[in-house]
Image (cartoon, helix red, strand yellow):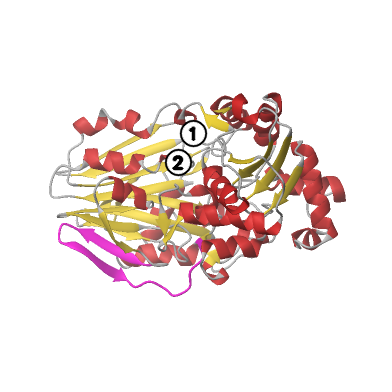
Amino acid sequence: MSGLCGVVSREHCPEILMFGTDYHSHLGSQLGGMAVLGERFEKKIHDITQGSFKFRFSKDVQEMVGTMGIGVVSDSDAQPLLIRSRFGLYALAMTGLIGNKDALARELLDRGTVFTESSEGGINGIELLARLIDRGGDLAEGLASVYDAIEGAASMLLLDNDGILAARDRLGRSPLIIGERGDDLMVASESIALISLGFTPVKELGPGEIVRISHDGYRVVRAPAQAMRICAFLWIYTGYPAASYEGIGVEGVRERCGAALVRRDPVQADLAAGVPDSGTGHGIGYASAAGIPFRRALVKYTPGYGRSYIPSSQSARDHVARMKLIAVPEVVRGASMVLCEDSIVRGTQLANHTIQKLWSAGAREIHMRAACPPLMFPCRYGFSTRALEELVARRAIRSLEGDMSGNLERYLDEDSPEHARMVEWIRTMLKVTTLRYQRLDDMIAAIGLPADRLCTYCWTGKACGYREVGPD
């Protein structure tokens, strides 16, 4: 995952850019970067695994000078990069995933393209995008041409001498929103970055739309497309509770998801709780619909541990999961409880740390409720889920069928005996009293957009829009 922020100001912008980018820290935990343009370009990139974005960049912003800039938090490539091209010097950052990065790199290398940046032993995806952009007639045309070349998704911010070009993914899988504060403009992945810093949201870019943001304001240079497939996981897990996308607030969706779980399968319990933080809204919705108290059975020791979902190594994920959550004995002891979670991805931290802590604190029953269906496919458009073998639903299928894809269509059918057996296998692994997943149609109804406006690939395996990678 990644988050983007850009600022065009009449005055010095590095500090406001730092804070705006820091409001995207829930979207990435590995790398952070800023590029600022005054009389010249200045760029800084830091490892943020052991400190917050604003902590790492607080000294840099005292030294950087400029009235325009872009920032990014990322879990993949080092960015933003400064690119020297036939269009002049510019800085580039992106959020998304290029599924055919290696094939595109080989094609460009065969044509004589030289790459200078690396990422995890391979070619940096941001530099690859820059080489694709450079094939266009101008920068805006080059940004648009990226969508025809890649398998995956990309929203981008490009900073040059004329301002910022903001380009939303071709099918709008990740958002970009523009806000105004007097004469200053900000563009961000998250609406909370704008609102928290006093900017009024004035425009949400449409799918494939490209907007030029400058000291003269903003103007559309490429009109939006009609087709959209925004990531449904934004509302269920990825997005911040106070954020909204396409005019739909995250917290409201989560509360409606919790209520839908009650309607499908009410259970007698003393209380409802949520796994902090993103499970909290689902738990509140469940409690309200069920007419039982919502109580904090689990609390986070400190926000500094971040999301256990994000780190790339299993040992790092285990460490975060083990340290960050604490059971509250006064709430848990002797209670039959409904525990709501946004999703169950790997299930390892949930089983080994979260649920075990609740049993150790004296829970009488733990009824686990997931606010979305079982995750069945690694995300092709971002870094939400990385590998097939990490998904607990596929591990269940392998145990039941002998391989991860055996009888897959039946397991995708929410009413089939195979699906029920898969859920029971996961329940046993988690060591909970009962386990229920949200149904796909209930989740879509809670979001409130038509199904054909949402990307639900990680649950259904039904891809759309781009040239697709081969089937799993």
Q: Which residue is mark 1?
A: 306
Relative to the observer, which residue lies in front, 382 or 141? 382
Q: Which residue is mark 2?
A: 26
Q: Are marks 2 and 1 in contact (CB under 8 Å)?
A: yes
What is the number of the mark on residue 284? none
Residue extending furthest front? Answer: 291
Q: Position of residue 239 (x, y in %)?
A: 47, 49
Residue 210 part of the magenta segment: yes
**Image: magenta residue range:** 209-230
Query: Is 186 placed left or right of 364 in the picture?
Result: left
Amino acid carrying label 2: it is: His
Relative to the observer, which residue lies in front, 148 or 198? 198
Relative to the observer, which residue lies in front, 42 or 137? 42
Q: Tell me the CA gap for discs 2 and 1.
A: 7 Å
Q: Position of residue 141 (x, y in %)?
A: 34, 67
- In terms of secondary structure, where does tag 2 sit? helix
Residue 435 visible in the displayed image: yes
